[in-house]
Image: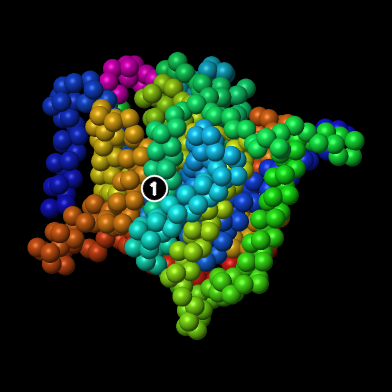
Amino acid sequence: MNFWLIQSMNSLAMGGVLFMLAAGFSLIFGLMRVANLSHGAYFMLGAYIGLHMLDLGFGFATAAIAATLGVGLLGGIVERLILRRLGNNTLSQVLATLGIAFVIADGSLWIWGGDPRPVSGPAFLSGGMQLFGLTFPKYRVAVVVFSIAVGLGLWLLLDKTRLGMMIRASVDDRQMAQAVGVPASRLFTVVFCLGTALAGLGGVIAAPILSVYPGLDADMLPLALVVVILGGLGSLAGAFVGSFVIGFIYSFGQVLLPDLAYMILFLPMVIILAARPRGLFGRITA
Amino acid sequence: MKRALLAVFIAVLLMLPLATGGVYYTNLASQILIAALFSLSLNLMVGFAGLTSLGHAGYLGLSAYASAWLMTNLGWGHLESAAAALGITAVAAGLFGLIALRAASISFLMITLALGQILWGLAYRWTGVTGGDNGISSLTRPHPFGIDLGNPVNFYYFALVVFLAVWGSIAMWVRSPFGASIRGTRDQPRRMAALGFDVWVIRWITFVVSGVLGGVGGLMYVYYHQFISPHSLSLANSAEMLLMVIAGGAGTLSGPVVGAALVLLLKNVASAYVDRWVMLLGAVFILIVMFLPGGIVAGVARLGGMRRKASVPVPAAAPVNKTDLRPEVAKEAS
């Protein structure tokens, strides 16, 4: 009983981390039709920037903000300088993001070295807390709460603001949105910044759970792909549900079937592709 | 003209070990031939079927691990284990095709990436079978007709025979009526369907053939290195194969060979000076996609076309050149 509850909390925390990763991926895909294969690299870069700030003696919150802004800024630059020049050629854009992923990954290896680095969370969240007579790690509980807050924030942004309205309009029908005056060009940059910043934030938040190591990017990218294929491309709700489903499968798989854990992760993707190729909540296919 | 070029090219390949004289260059030439097996087989999907796959290193891993495991654990001979390895690769490719061909375009790419990562994860984590991170080592090279392939020159000729056989069969295949139907499903899937072709089956057969030929490359790879580890199945390796295809020219017969040679030469030259091959790979990827989307062979052909107008066929539209989504998908999306 104990085991199941504690593993469930781990699963929720993993799901929360995955959500921050996959929400940005899904958002970018929904608007630009670009599968951003550098998303895992932005996630890892966020974690490394956070680690670097902590090493310099800043607090966790400052580190998180720095990573979010830094990665988002880099995303904006990449969108403006590289992806934009490839025009409407989606496949070229995807391949370019793959190249960017390698540059970031190898650059991080160069700067921060090859050893896995543990990261400690903020001091006031260390230790455990009593819940239902069991002790849960405080940090993981906080991650779950935080990711739900991020999800709510994103939902408010997309559903209640003018910016969100423009994004949704462009996701549904890009040509039509442009025709009625949505500044699609600026929107692309904004969304790419937002999506990559979310990945960077996810990386910092995940660092105390997963630690930071070279290859973290290649570990996370397939998870993001599986989440969005499961939930449906371009759907926030899909990313949310998909993340927690994969979070549970990941955490329980690690414990119950360590040898095959990685493989089991992909089962839901296979099933959903067989039964409903556009994903649980998806409206678009590509 | 073209035939003469081909004859010269093959003659050069035959003479190569004599000309270079060093073990290093002979081995490098063998590695290029093996890499060309991967790029040629991947090109069937990327160039001719218009479906960009990012999991091709998985087939390398499948056949290499299968043959290595059968030889070390069951004591099978080279021939039986090679045949079984290719059979396993074919079955896996068949299953993967069922899944991946549910989608096209970007989703296809994402699914093949995920499938490739499954195989990587298996190789890495299923330590009981694959030896985990350490891989399977101290393997042997086969002795066909009593020839010792431990000798670099002998191995080079062995690789050359396999390479020419694969290249020739791919050339014949893509020029056959079936090859024309593959290109048809790339350019006009809906028209092909209207003409009574089963687009899905054509793609699936191409997918499986591409996988099995990738498996042939995997066997050559494991014979050459006498070692296989999860690293060979990594996403970076799949991307390297795709770079060979795109850099050389997708959808052409010579492009992938040129691309394989270029990437391997670059890799070898670069690694003598810098330690950052992956970063260089990424940078080259970005530059090729931005400035040479049709690949080098198409670029050269275009230059030639300026001199001799119209004699050069338009490079069979590399999918990178394509604008947006596949027609039938675009229809659904809009």
| In magenta stretch: residue B236 | no
Instruction: Give the residue type at disc 1.
Output: Gly
Percent across and percent down for residue A16 are: 68, 48
Q: In this view, does B164 lie above or below B64?
A: below
Q: In this view, does B239 lie above or below B273?
A: below
Which chain is disc 1 placed on? A
Tag 1 secondary structure = helix
Q: Would residue A70 appear left or right of A125 to someone viewing this image?
A: left
Residue at (29%, 40%) from the top-left corner? B263
**Residue, disc 1:** A99
Q: Which residue in the rendered view is the most extreme toward the left?
A: B307
Color style of the picture: rainbow
Q: Which residue in the rendered view is the most extreme toward the bottom?
A: A180
Residue at (19%, 38%) from the top-left corner? B10
**Highlighted magenta segment, given as a residue range:** B141-155
Q: Is residue A159 above or below residue B156?
A: below
Percent across and percent down for residue B265 are: 25, 35
Percent across and percent down for residue A276 are: 67, 61
Q: Nearer the viewer, residue B86 or A231?
A: A231
